[in-house]
Amino acid sequence: EPEVTQTPSHQVTQMGQEVILRCVPISNHLYFYWYRQILGQKVEFLVSFYNNEISEKSEIFDDQFSVERPDGSNFTLKIRSTKLEDSAMYFCASRAGQNEKLFFGSGTQLSVL
Amino acid sequence: SQKIEQNSEALNIQEGKTATLTCNYTNYSPAYLQWYRQDPGRGPVFLLLIRENEKEKRKERLKVTFDTTLKQSLFHITASQPADSATYLCATRTLYNTDKLIFGTGTRLQVFP
């Protein structure tokens, strides 16, 4: 079965550094998402992306965050200046056009020191 | 806005019994509810979707019900197995015209032999 792949699986960074989390969504999917999950808490929506632009974003997704689909396959999340509270598991997800079912990647565990 | 509530206490049951998990929503009746399974350190995996005009949906040993009067969905696993041990998440959209899927905190199910 096709799957969403995310790299790296773990990322450790110093506070204030920039990080880029990478995702390869399923190839024929049209809608792309980033979610995050702080340890022991719920899966939280960050941003949705469709037709090469952000369609929705949460209040968490401030000016320090950006997303990009630089080519036909990758979807990235950039955090410009990381904070301690950005430490979390970040999940990429995608879905096909008329199907509400989300396919999630295995996540990138981000640790900000 | 819409909120999803799940029992945060773990559910422990014996192998072979039926597990029943509850999802309550607080506001308007959503167009659908989704159920996902999440294993530790992994991304959610889609299980079932039930629409507001459907009372029940089945898939193998899984059954989901939707009661718009009670504002509740029940998720059943019959003949449970230790391999069913995981956290089960309920999810829906915040509004009819949004692409933002929100998740409950999940209920951890532990099936013991």
Image: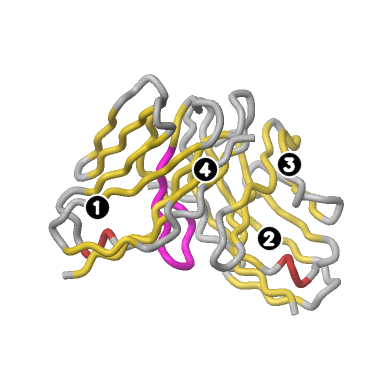
Q: Secondary structure at mark 2?
A: strand
Task: Give the magenta range.
Answer: B34-44
- Alpha-carbon span between mark 3 and mark 4: 19 Å
- Alpha-carbon span between mark 1 and mark 4: 20 Å
- Residue B25: image location, x then y, percent: 49, 37
Q: The disc labelled 4 sits on which kind of residue? A: Ile
Mark in the foreground, 3 or 1: 1
**Residue annotated with mark 4:** B4
Q: The disc labelled 1 sits on which kind of residue? A: Ala
Of the residues under marks 3 and 2, which one precedes in the sequence? Answer: 2
Q: Which mark is residue B39?
A: none
- Residue A45: image location, x then y, percent: 64, 47
- Alpha-carbon span between mark 3 and mark 1: 35 Å
- Alpha-carbon span between mark 4 and mark 2: 28 Å
Q: Secondary structure at mark 3?
A: strand
Q: Chain of mark 1?
A: B
Q: Which mark is residue A57?
A: 3
| Residue in the foreground of this view, choosing between B96 and A28 | B96
Q: Quadrant of residue A6?
A: bottom right
**Residue annotated with mark 1:** B19
